[in-house]
Structure formats: C-alpha cells, structure tokens
Image: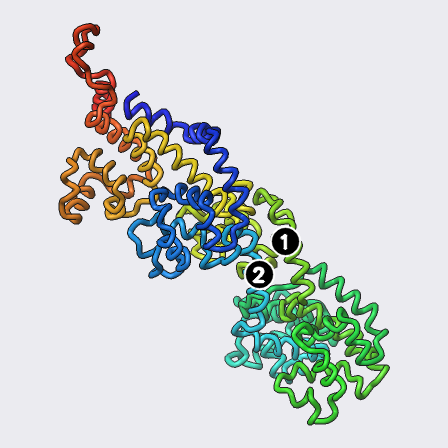
Amino acid sequence: MNTYISYQLIARDIPKAIDRIERQPMVDRETKYYLDNIGKVRSIDEFVKDDRLFKYAMKAFGLQDMSYAKAFMVKALKEGVTDPDSFANKLTDKRYAEFVAAFNFAKYGEEATVYSQAKQGVVKNFALQFELGPVQEGFTFAEPETSYFLANVTSVKSIDDLMGNERLLDYAMTAFGLDAETESPDRIRQMLEGGISDPDSPANRHPDKRYAKLVAAFDFAAHGDQATLRDEVLRGVPKAFMDESGLLLIKTDADHIAAEATYYAQNISKVTSISDLLSDRRLLTVAMAAFGLDADAESPQRIREMLAGGIADPASPANKETDKRYAAFVKAFNFAEYGVATTSRPEVLQDTGRFYVVKSELGLSKPSNAWFQAETAYYQANIGKVQSVDDLMADKRLYNYAIASFGLDPDKEDRATIRKVLESGEADPASFANKTGDKRYIALAKAFDFTAHGEGATTYNASRQDVVDKYMRQTLEEDAGNSNEGVRLALYFERKAAGLTNWYEVLADKALATVVRTAFGLPESFAAADIDRQVKLFESKMKIEDFADPAKLAKFMTRFTSLYEINNPTSPALNAASILFAQPTTMGVSTNLLMAMQQLRSR
C-alpha cells in the first residue's frame, strides 16, 4: 500500500492500532515489568541502574538513541525543570524537559515515581493552608477584634451602649462594609432607632442596603435589650466581618465542631483543678481554641504556669505576655482565684463554649492536629475510589478537603461553579477554569482532571500510565516506519502538530522539518538556507495555528503523504524479466504512484 493509504488506515483509528501494539508479546512483557517496578524506584541512581526500566522510559519519549548517555540524563534529572535555566530546559530538544517533568526527582524526591497531584499534591497543599492560615496578613487584626466582640457584645443592651463602645461599633459597621470614621454618628443612631420593621424607616428608605443589614442585626427597636443575644449578632456579625476581611482559612467541619462543643458542655464542670484540665486533651483544646490559642503548639508546663499565676497580679505570667489571648484564657479559667468553683462560672460554662463554636466556624481557631490528621487520613484512604466529578462532589468531607487545599472556602464557593471548573479540565486554554483567570480554579482543575484522565484522574501519575501511553505510541510509529518511513513521519507530525506555536519549533526538530519541506514541495537542500528565510517562506504558505484545526491538519497530512509517495514510490523497480513477461503496464508508472497523484490533485 502507498504512503497515503497506510497512514490513513492507522490514523483513522489510533486506539485500535495501539491495541494491536499492546498485544505484541515483547511489548506486553516490557510494559508489565515497567508497571510492576517503576513505583519501587526512590532515586535517580536506582532509576538509571535498572537498564530495563530506564530504556523503556527513554523510548517512551523518543530518546532511545540516548539510553547509553546515563551521565547526561542524570544531570538533567538532578536539575529538574522548575528553574527555567536548568539543564533540561536549556536544551533545544524539548523531549528532555518532558522526560524530566515525568520523572521529577528534583521536585518530588522519593515520591517522584508515585506522585499524584490529586493525592500527594492536594495533601501537601492542605497542610500548607493549615499551617499558614494564622499568619496571613489581616489575621492578627481579625482574631483579637472578633474575640473582643464576642466577649463584650452581650453586655450591650441598648443603642446608647453600642454607640458608647467605639471598638464594638467599628467592628459591627465594618462587618457590613461601612466605615465608622467617615459615617456620621447621628446618621447611624437615626438608622438604629428607626429599626427595620417599618418599610418607611430610615434604613429601609436609604438606597444603600448596607444600613438595613446593620439595623437588621442590631434591631433594638424590635428586640430591646435582648437584641445582642440573638444568633444574628453572635454568629451573623462575626461571619459578615470575616467575609469582608477576605481571609481564606481552614475551618473545622460543622459535625466536628458540634461534637467537640457537646463534649465540652458535658464534661467541663467535672474539672476542678489545673491538673484536671491538662489531663483531658480534648477539653483543653476546646478551652484554648475559644481564646485563639493552639493547645498543640503549647507545652503543658507553659500552660500550667500561665493558669497557676492567675490574673490578679500585674506581674503574673499571663499579664506579662504581649499576646493578650493568654490573659483572656486565664481570666476565664482562673483557678488561682476561684479554685474548684472555676468551671461552674458562666465564663467557662457558657461563654467559652460559644466562643469556640463561633471562632471555629470562622476559621479563627486553628483546627486541632487530631482533626487535621483524621481528615487527611480519610482523604488518603478514599480519594482513590473517586472516579468522576459526581463522586467527588457527593462526598462532603473529600470535597471540602480538596477545594480548601487550593485556598477555596467550601462555605462560600458556589458548588455549580466548582462543578464547571472540574468538568472543564485544564488542558484547553478555552476551558471554563482557564477563562476565569483564577489560579486557584485552574490548579483545582489540573489536580482533578477528569476531562483528560477520566476515571483514573485521582490516581493519575505521570511516570506510569502517561509513560506507557507514550511508549505504545512510539512503538506504533516505529513499527509503521519499518514498512514505510513516510508513515512514521506522518504519525509523528500528527502527534506533535497541535502543540506547535511557531515555525522555529518545527525547524528545531529534524523530523517535523522534513514533513513540512516535503508538503511544501521544497528540496532537501532548502534546509541549508538561512533559518529566518525558511520561517518566512513557511509563514507565507501556512499559519502555524492551522495545525490545531483537525480539518486543516488532515488536508496538510494528505498533501505530505501524497508528495512523499511521489518522491519515494513504494512499488519496487521493474527488472528486465518482469518487463518481458508481465502484462502491459501504464508506461512504468505504478498504481500506487497514480493513486498518490490523484489524492494530491483532489486536494
């Protein structure tokens, strides 16, 4: 068969052609060995010493001719591809950078051959968000201001009380996007006095609905001195404040918060001493978290010292601390002053539990290490079972963990938007995720790329299936080349075409350049011409972007395979005997050659 027909027979059903390759005994044997052993490799030295593994990997990237150059490849692998000036990145042939990216020991170390973005990558991201949350810019303002609000707002029984406490008023107004420094106190008072029930009240008549939201929360007109005891104030105002702050914090899930709050309420009154509190890690964690302190980060000795010193003496350890959260904690759990009656006080029985719940819901209390470890263990044990976007979104724990690891707040994100991000994938520049321009969405789509990897998205590892796929394609092209080099060139070009961005890339690859010169009817000698002149001529004949268009690429490939056949006829030369005894022929022109010419003419 001629070049055109041979290429078409393969190109029209690549999966079927790959399937035939996979069934070849040698290919099957080598692939099984690769998959059984690549995950055991923990270093570059182990990788290159296993000749069988290394050669398989090199062939997958079309680098089999360089399998002997192990020192060269070790240098490339050690420097990785993160640095634009790394050895692999500086090489003109981009196959080396692709190889190093697949076996990225420089970035992932011992995990390089088992690394999965959906597994190890997400877990690392989540841990980073967990650790960095409390040190974000703005946290050091939001946490103490919220603590002050929660500790004092229930004492506010009237509009006068609220207006008389500048710090509380500033917090409340900020929560609803209002600036206390520029707002007239008289206007705020007028708004609050008018309430929200009457459609003609000042707040309801004002076009800026932020005033109405403030008055709805602090509705003294309707609720009198009970106004600040309502959820709209105790939970709604801090939530609005945090929404305005823009902070992205890891938050403990609602079920865990409820369970810990219940345990605290049922057991705190049993605590009669500092030793009792320190001996119950679960109670201690809730108690300290209520005041913005992390029990996991404090030593028992330090906590005991703070509590034993009390709060009455200005020189006590808690009072001497610059961080006033310690003083607030010790003031509530003041064993030095109240002894066994300490935990029967409202500050401990009611307020501490309330502070814990609200601040945990806001992310202002760092989740405990026990919670972090439990959520991470659950994620690691179950994410590999997820085979679709629906699976991921159906499991609330997995979903929350996954999107939180990319700095997205599960409570704020629209689930329909997240679904679009996940379904769109990341590879296509025009995908929904990419069009948002939000790097968090793009990173999420890349980690859970069901579009590209289907059911295997959550277990996808570049050094496994991706390498095997490349190996199969490479073997397919080699097999085709054993019969017809033109078919191999055509298959190679078809594989690379969509990723080409400029003609210089084409000229840098001998095989690609050969295909283009043949398709444009240029002699081999043209390869010696000035490179800029070659590029200019190519640009005059075709736009590089056209290779991303399947119809235009198909037309180009027809032209190449037809001209290649004319230049390299697949029919053998006729010898003297065949001329004497064969049936009449068409003036020595083969049927294959005629077919190639016809294909070229029809295009």
Q: In x, y percent, where is residue 449?
A: 50, 47
Residue 162 in which image quadrant: bottom right
In the rendered image, the quadrant that contains the C terminus is top left
Q: Which label was assigned to residue 90?
A: none
Q: Are marks 1 and 2 in contact (CB under 8 Å)?
A: yes
| Residue denoted by label 1 | 379
Viewer-closest of 268 and 596: 596
Which residue type does callout 1 highlight?
A: Tyr
Q: In x, y percent, where is residue 135?
A: 55, 73
Viewer-closest of 370 and 551: 370
As helix, strand or loop, the secondary structure at mark 2 comes to: helix
Viewer-closest of 359 and 209: 359
Instruction: Note whether 229 is above or below 61 in the view shown.
Output: below
Residue 258 in which image quadrant: bottom right
176 relative to 473 in the view: left or right? right
Q: In x, y percent, where is residue 234?
A: 69, 71
Which residue type does callout 2 highlight?
A: Phe
Q: In x, y percent, where is residue 288?
A: 71, 75
- Residue at 46 percent across and 32 percent down: it is 26
Total number of numbered labels?
A: 2
- Residue at 17 percent across and 42 percent down: it is 527
Identify the mark nearer the N-term, 1 or 2: 2
Label 1 crowd bin: few (<14), some (14–19), many (20+), radius 10 Å: some
- Residue at 29 percent across and 25 percent down: it is 4
Label 2 crowd bin: few (<14), some (14–19), many (20+), radius 10 Å: many
| Residue denoted by label 2 | 126
Instruction: Note whether 151 is above or below 106 in the view shown.
Output: below
In the rendered image, the quadrant that contains the N terminus is top left
